[in-house]
Image (cartoon, grey):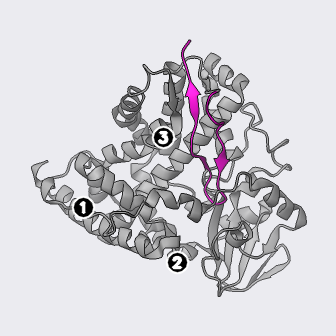
């Protein structure tokens, strides 16, 4: 790809800025937010206030607006599915600023449905499954090959943190020289506490993707950028603004959440060795193990919506323009739906969870996330016999108020 050498990616102006260090500030370091969430749910399905400051984080997104915390399962489902009253325009104040107002996460119908059709066409299960062998498996082999002979590893730092991002680099067919800067900019886009850095990241990624899209349209390949640029539905092609917004968001929507979900899954299995051994004995249990991890401690605990009109929810008046923190984690641990909900149990009766949202904005990349988590778990079972927590290292702790993940998972394997 000789022509690609002309495409320049620009790092942050401040070389000392570390976007990876901002995770706790933006998303919290709470060890267990679920007791507080349960207390809210016991109190009322709709609570006046904003989730972030109630969890000890920085101020609410738009403090001049009314804020409500939604913790009742029925009310959560209503807010996520009733698009006539509750809008994704709430994301225009954060995601829309850095990913671009062309992000489908900020849109409502009819625009959302029109452009989502193209993304759905590319991310259908029959297409995504082919990436498992051609893209996902080689990434797994490369990463595991670096620690297999050692007999011990930090599965977060050496595997799950890198794994989904490496998949995205290969899907986009990025030059290896761009990868480190690309990841720094992509992560920095959601550092809303350092707002000027988030803006800078969005601008620089936008310029990079504009040149990359032009190059792939002129010389298309079988990479994801080419597919997105050249795929149409009903005669519609993605406008450049929407395509570039999606590419800006891909690293966070597909990479960050998959890293968190896979990390939680492996942590939960290591804390429940009987269930890990059950998977070794019966690989058909893998799908329900993945769904249970997503239910039990999904990577995104809170989703955001805006009231489009004066309305009521559970008898509470919701003024037009109010912001609603929709706590998916509350529904996922509702004891009325899931007996003993705080327990990780891959054998429980499967019921749909809320971790990929509901309604028209249900995650378009959910099939790819499941493929990546499935392939990762197969690789662990295939190549890490006798996997167990490292007794000489601290135990893993899943942390976060908004986005959940363990930062380390020290393990030993082999005899």
Which quadrant of the view contains residue 390? top right
Is residue 117 something that shows in the picture?
no
Q: Residues within 10 Å of mark 1 (few under 14, many from 20)?
A: some
Counting residues from the start of the chain, the first of labels 3 and 1 encountered is: 1
Residue placed under numbered mark 3 in the picture: 157
- Image vertical order of residue 216 relative to residue 148, above or below: below
Is residue 28 something that shows in the picture?
yes
**Residue 106 versus residue 56: which sits nearer the camera?**
56
Question: What's the residue at 39%, 50% (across, down)?
Answer: 122
Question: What's the residue at 66%, 31% (across, down)?
Answer: 269
Q: Residues within 10 Å of mark 3 (few under 14, many from 20)?
A: some
Picture coordinates of residue 284, whole percent (x, y): 61, 24
Q: Are marks 3 and 2 in contact (CB under 8 Å)?
A: no
Q: CA distance from mark 1 to mark 2?
A: 26 Å
Q: Are marks 1 and 2 in contact (CB under 8 Å)?
A: no
**Residue 324 versus residue 122: which sits nearer the camera?**
324
Question: What's the residue at 75%, 68% (across, down)?
Answer: 70
Residue placed under numbered mark 2 in the picture: 93
Q: Give yes or no for residue 405 being in the magenta stretch.
A: yes
Q: CA distance from mark 3 to mark 2?
A: 32 Å
Picture coordinates of residue 311, whole percent (x, y): 75, 82
User: Is 289 on the left-hand or right-hand side of 34?
Assistant: left
* Magenta-drawn stretch, dominant element (helix, strand or loop): loop
Counting residues from the start of the chain, the first of labels 1 and 2 encountered is: 1
Residue placed under numbered mark 1 in the picture: 9
- Image vertical order of residue 178 relative to residue 101, above or below: above
| Boundaries of the magenta span | 392-415
């Amino acid at each position: 790809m000789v022509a690609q050498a002309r495409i320049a990616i620009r790092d942050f102006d401040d070389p000392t800025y570390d976007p990876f260090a901002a995770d706790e500030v933006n998303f919290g370091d709470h060890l267990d937010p679920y007791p507080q969430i349960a207390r809210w749910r016991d109190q009322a399905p709709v609570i006046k206030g904003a989730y972030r400051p109630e969890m000890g984080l920085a101020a609410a997104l738009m403090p001049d607006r009314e804020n409500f915390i939604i913790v009742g399962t029925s009310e959560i489902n209503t807010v996520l599915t009733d698009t006539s009253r509750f809008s994704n325009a709430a994301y225009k104040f954060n995601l829309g600023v850095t990913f671009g107002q062309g992000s489908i996460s900020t849109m409502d119908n009819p625009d959302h449905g029109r452009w989502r059709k193209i993304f759905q066409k590319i991310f259908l299960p029959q297409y995504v499954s082919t990436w498992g062998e051609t893209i996902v498996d080689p990434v797994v082999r490369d990463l595991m090959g670096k620690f297999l002979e050692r007999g011990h590893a930090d599965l977060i730092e050496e595997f799950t943190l890198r794994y989904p991002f490496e998949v995205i680099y290969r899907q986009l067919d990025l030059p290896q020289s761009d990868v480190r800067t690309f990841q720094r900019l992509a992560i920095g886009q959601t550092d809303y506490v350092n707002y000027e850095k988030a803006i800078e990241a969005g601008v620089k990624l936008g310029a990079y993707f504009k040149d990359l899209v032009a190059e792939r349209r002129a010389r298309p390949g079988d990479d994801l950028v080419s597919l997105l640029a050249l795929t149409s539905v009903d005669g519609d092609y993605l406008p450049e603004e929407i395509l570039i917004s999606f590419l800006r968001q891909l690293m966070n929507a597909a990479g960050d959440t998959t890293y968190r979900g896979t990390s939680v899954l492996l942590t939960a299995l290591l804390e429940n060795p009987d269930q890990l051994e059950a998977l070794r004995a019966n690989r058909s249990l893998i799908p329900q193990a993945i769904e249970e991890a997503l239910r039990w401690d999904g990577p995104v605990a809170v989703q955001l919506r805006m009231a489009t009109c004066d309305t009521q929810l559970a008898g509470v008046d919701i003024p037009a323009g109010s912001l609603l923190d929709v706590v998916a984690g509350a529904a996922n641990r509702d004891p009325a739906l899931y007996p003993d909900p705080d327990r990780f149990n891959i054998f429980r009766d499967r019921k749909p969870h809320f971790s990929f949202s509901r309604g028209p904005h249900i995650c378009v990349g959910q099939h790819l996330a499941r493929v990546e988590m499935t392939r990762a778990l197969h690789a662990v079972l295939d190549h890490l016999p006798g996997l167990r927590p490292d007794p000489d290292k601290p135990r893993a702790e899943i942390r976060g108020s908004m986005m959940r993940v363990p930062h380390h998972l020290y393990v030993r394997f082999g005899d």
